[in-house]
Image (cartoon, rainbow, N blue to C red):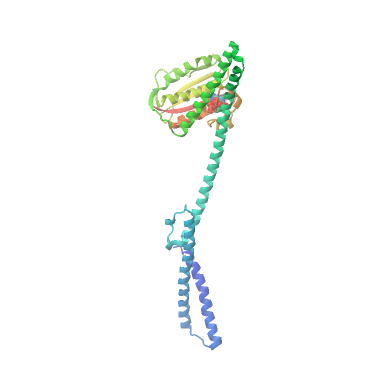
């Protein structure tokens, strides 16, 4: 059994005191009164003096330490005073120092995470205002020009109104993305999980982008002919949004005349894996890790020209994670990108 440290302290101190007291007393008796105390008496008195010293010292030391430790526990509100017992003071000093250390480490972590959140909040506000400023000033510019007289010319008026409208649409789409992100982040997204045929959904999205695809002379198709419907579990509207965002990106960052291919396969855990693959500009290795972050874009001006808000992929990731599924990205710079996400088979 581990001897309490205060016992060791009281023992050594008592030995020293006993030796000094008995020795001093014997010395005094001998020189002053030339009395020599016999050995038996010396031994008894040594033992008695030792125990007296030892008991008094031990109690006093314990009381002293207990009072001070108690004060620390009372003053540091986060330490649990119930953990402190009077009979176990010395080990409690050890546990106190451990608790103190843990307390300091926790505080350090808390401070770091608060600092991180603060930086993130500042960046987020900066990003939002930056994203909104550009289309807002464009719209304002056209409206001011119209007010100042451009409205009199019918051709100019129509053209400027059309451009102002594009700016407003852009603002609306950014606000919608922000709204979606905030809902996703506060877990305010009520998923309506139901079985649906993903094959049919993808085919509908292909039709939706027909014009855009033709404009860039691109091809958007399945990798092979799928004969039977493939049913998956998920919130159909949200999964549609995921597919649209991925396909829109493949068109935006794909090359003229390029191919975008969607494939549906099975994974080991009997899940369905949907893959959107393009042979566009690809993403450099150093950017792959950050691509799903809010507002993260490889080429800001290019993305903005293409109507991007930098929120598309973070929305995709949130939706997939809300379904408790995963999304991965494989990409080679200059060759193309491949986004794969899983869904539960229905
Ligand atoms: P954005 O609105 O800028 O498109 P996203 O979150 O959708 O925002 O995408 C983030 C960035 O990831 C884009 O700016 C682009 O640089 C890169 N990216 C996304 N998809 C692709 C892709 N298919 N090919 C190449 N780069 C891509």
**Residue found at x 55% / y 42%:** 115
Where on the picture, by quarter, is residue 252?
Answer: top right
Is residue 95 visible in this depiction of the protein?
no
- Residue 125: give x, y in percent of width and height: 55, 33
Figure quadrant of residue 325? top left
Relative to residue 69, is residue 343 depicted above or below?
above
Residue nearest the observer in this picture, 135 or 66: 135
The quadrant of the image that shows the N terminus is: bottom left
Identify which residue, 185 or 208, lies in the foreground. Answer: 185
Question: Looking at the image, is 253 positioned above or below residue 39?
Answer: above
Q: In which quadrant of the rendered image does the C terminus lie?
A: top left
Between 22 and 104, the residue placed more toward the observer is: 104
Quarter of image, ligand 1: top right
Position in image of residue 152 (x %, y %): 60, 12
Q: Position of residue 216 (x, y in %)?
A: 56, 16
**Residue 39 can be seen, yes or no:** yes
């Amino acid at each position: 059994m581990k001897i309490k440290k205060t016992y060791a302290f009281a023992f050594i101190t008592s030995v020293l005191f006993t030796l000094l007291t008995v020795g001093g007393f014997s010395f005094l008796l001998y020189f002053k009164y030339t009395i020599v105390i016999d050995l038996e008496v010396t031994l008894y008195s040594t033992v008695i003096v030792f125990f007296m010293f030892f008991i008094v010292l031990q109690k006093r030391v314990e009381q002293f330490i207990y009072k001070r430790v108690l004060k620390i526990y009372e003053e540091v509100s986060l330490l649990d005073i119930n953990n402190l017992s009077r009979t176990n003071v010395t080990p409690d000093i050890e546990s106190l120092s451990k608790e103190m250390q843990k307390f300091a480490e926790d505080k350090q972590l808390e401070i770091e995470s608060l600092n991180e959140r603060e930086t993130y909040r500042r960046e987020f506000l900066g990003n939002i205002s930056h994203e909104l400023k550009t289309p807002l000033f464009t719209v304002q510019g056209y409206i001011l020009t119209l007010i100042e007289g451009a409205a009199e010319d019918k051709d100019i008026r129509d053209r400027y109104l059309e451009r102002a409208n594009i700016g407003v649409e852009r603002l609306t789409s950014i606000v919608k993305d922000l709204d979606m992100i905030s809902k996703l982040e506060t877990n305010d997204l009520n998923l309506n999980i139901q079985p649906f045929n993903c094959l049919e959904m993808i085919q509908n999205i292909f039709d939706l982008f027909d014009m855009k695809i033709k404009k860039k002379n691109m091809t958007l198709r399945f990798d092979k002919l799928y004969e039977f419907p493939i049913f998956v579990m998920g919130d159909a509207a949200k999964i549609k949004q995921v597919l649209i965002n991925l396909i829109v990106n493949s068109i935006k960052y794909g090359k003229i005349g390029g191919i975008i291919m969607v494939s549906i396969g099975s994974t080991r855990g009997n899940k369905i894996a949907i893959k959107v693959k393009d042979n566009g500009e690809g993403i450099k290795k150093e950017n792959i890790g950050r691509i799903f972050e809010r507002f993260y874009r490889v080429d800001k001006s290019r993305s903005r020209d293409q109507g991007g808000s930098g929120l598309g992929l973070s929305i995709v990731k949130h939706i997939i994670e809300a379904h408790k599924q995963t999304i991965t990205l494989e990409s080679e710079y200059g060759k193309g990108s491949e986004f794969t996400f899983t869904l539960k088979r229905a």
